[in-house]
Image (cartoon, rainbow, N blue to C red):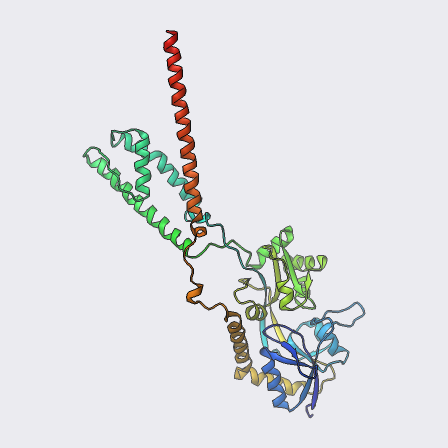
């Protein structure tokens, strides 16, 4: 059977895959995206012209209570379009109302959250060591002055012994007058080895934290997201007309079913566009479900992508049940896959989006900045706290000494 000379193709705007524009005649056209090369390949192969149409609700399609569908699937079902493209996921429910070609791509359905913010600089002083190690260092600061005082027989008070221990931890030179027994040498030598390990470990990690700012923790796996949404601490959005919601609702995993139900219950639905994703509040507790190519191509270094995925989606062309040439189209799609054409178009599209998003991010001499006060604010704050405590203690000692002196004079006068 001869392939049609003209086709009406239903499409949807999705960054990196189908980026649409309008020509001088006011008609839709492909501007960029993976499926721009795909449709050009098919039109040249089968010698047909086409017109792009777009659903009013800008969705892929969801079933209505009357049996009709919305979005791309609805346009094909009603005969308003001969086929539908732009990352249409093949599902059993959709195959009941439209036909699908063989899959030409496999996509991971993931979620994205905002980029983690930098932690306060003062935490770079504390975080190089865990709580257990800090507790061990504190125990050493308490125990070692006593050991030095009584085992090394240092002829000074405990306050000076404490300062000696603290100075050695800070890699400062100290002058201790002690005996010459082997036990004392072993005690000091062991301590200096421990100090070397502690100081070197802390210094290396501390410098790395200053070089690369520490980031707050964000959820990046599906089980944690499902638990957070169930607790009410997070919100999870999905694209309008996407099959991901229905796939979650009918999932065999209870957490996934609860996640899908919460999206429908609160109606956390947004349009499948870059603007809609960017309009979400800049909060730590917001996630968006979508296909990985969309997030990778449109939000490079802007969003944090999940490490795992909800499921793998088979992508195909939705056809009218009356379409004549599905078998011929399937054969050409198989040849296209085997030749690696679609994979090459995907790489070119991702590279184009990557270059576009990084044109203003290139490192230049103007972008290299010197260290500012904010970079060392944690150390400055710690110094200020220490000096404040020292001034308070000094003032207390002065007042106490004057009080003792006055009290002594009063006792002497009474005698």
Q: Is residue 315 above or below residue 261?
A: below
Residue 144 location, x and y as percent?
32, 35
Apparent side of residue 16 relative to residue 172 in the rendered image (left or right): right
Position of the C terminus by quadrant: top left
In the image, farthest residue toward the top: 415
- State the residue at coordinates (26%, 39%): 174
In the image, farthest residue toward the left: 180
- State the residue at coordinates (70%, 88%): 6
Note whether residue 331 is visible.
Answer: no
Residue 246 location, x and y as percent?
69, 65
Q: Is residue 387 above or below residue 263?
A: above
Q: Is residue 403 above or below residue 30?
A: above
- State the residue at coordinates (24%, 39%): 186
In the image, farthest residue toward the right: 66
- Marks counted in the figure total 0
Residue 262 falls in which quadrant of the image? Answer: bottom right
Residue 128 location, x and y as percent?
41, 49
Q: Nearer the viewer, residue 343 or 120?
A: 120
Note whether residue 204 is visible.
Answer: yes
Residue 278 falls in which quadrant of the image? Answer: bottom right
Residue 405 location, x and y as percent?
37, 18
Apparent side of residue 63 relative to residue 30 in the rendered image (left or right): right
Position of the N terminus by quadrant: bottom right
Q: Nearer the viewer, residue 332 or 197?
A: 197
């Amino acid at each position: 059977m001869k392939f049609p000379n003209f086709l009406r193709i239903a499409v949807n705007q999705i960054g990196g895959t189908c980026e649409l524009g309008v020509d001088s005649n006011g008609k839709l056209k492909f501007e960029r995206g993976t499926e721009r090369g795909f449709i050009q390949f098919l039109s040249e192969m089968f010698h047909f012209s086409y017109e792009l149409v777009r659903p009013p609700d800008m969705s892929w399609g969801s079933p209505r209570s009357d049996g009709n569908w919305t979005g791309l699937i609805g346009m094909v079902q009603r005969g308003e379009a001969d086929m539908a493209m732009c990352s249409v996921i093949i599902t059993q429910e959709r195959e009941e109302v439209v036909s699908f070609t063989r899959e030409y791509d496999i996509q991971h359905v993931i979620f994205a959250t905002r980029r983690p913010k930098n932690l306060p600089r003062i935490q770079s002083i504390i975080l190089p060591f865990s709580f257990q190690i800090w507790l061990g260092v504190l125990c050493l600061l308490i125990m070692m002055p006593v050991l030095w005082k009584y085992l090394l027989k240092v002829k000074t008070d405990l306050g000076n012994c404490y300062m000696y221990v603290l100075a050695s931890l800070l890699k400062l030179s100290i002058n201790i007058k002690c005996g010459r027994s082997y036990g004392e040498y072993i005690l000091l030598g062991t301590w200096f080895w421990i100090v070397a390990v502690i100081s070197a470990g802390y210094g290396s990690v501390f410098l790395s934290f200053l070089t690369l700012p520490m980031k707050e923790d964000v959820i990046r796996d599906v089980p944690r997201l499902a638990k957070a949404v169930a607790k009410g601490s997070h919100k999870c959005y999905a694209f309008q007309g996407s099959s991901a919601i229905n796939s979650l609702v009918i999932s065999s995993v209870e957490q996934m079913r609860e996640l899908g139900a919460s999206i429908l219950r609160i109606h956390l639905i947004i349009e499948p566009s870059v603007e809609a994703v960017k309009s979400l509040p800049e909060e730590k507790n917001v996630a968006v479900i979508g296909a990985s190519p969309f997030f990778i191509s449109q939000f490079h270094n802007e969003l944090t992508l999940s490490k795992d995925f909800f499921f793998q989606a088979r992508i195909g062309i939705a056809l009218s049940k009356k379409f004549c040439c599905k078998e011929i189209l399937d054969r050409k799609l198989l040849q296209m896959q085997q030749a690696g054409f679609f994979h090459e178009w995907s790489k070119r599209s991702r590279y184009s989006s990557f270059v576009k998003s990084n044109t203003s991010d290139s490192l230049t001499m103007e972008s290299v900045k010197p260290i500012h006060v904010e970079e060392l604010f944690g150390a400055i704050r710690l110094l200020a706290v220490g000096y404040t405590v020292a001034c308070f203690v000094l003032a207390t000692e002065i007042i106490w000494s004057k009080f003792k002196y006055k009290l002594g004079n009063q006792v002497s006068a009474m005698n």
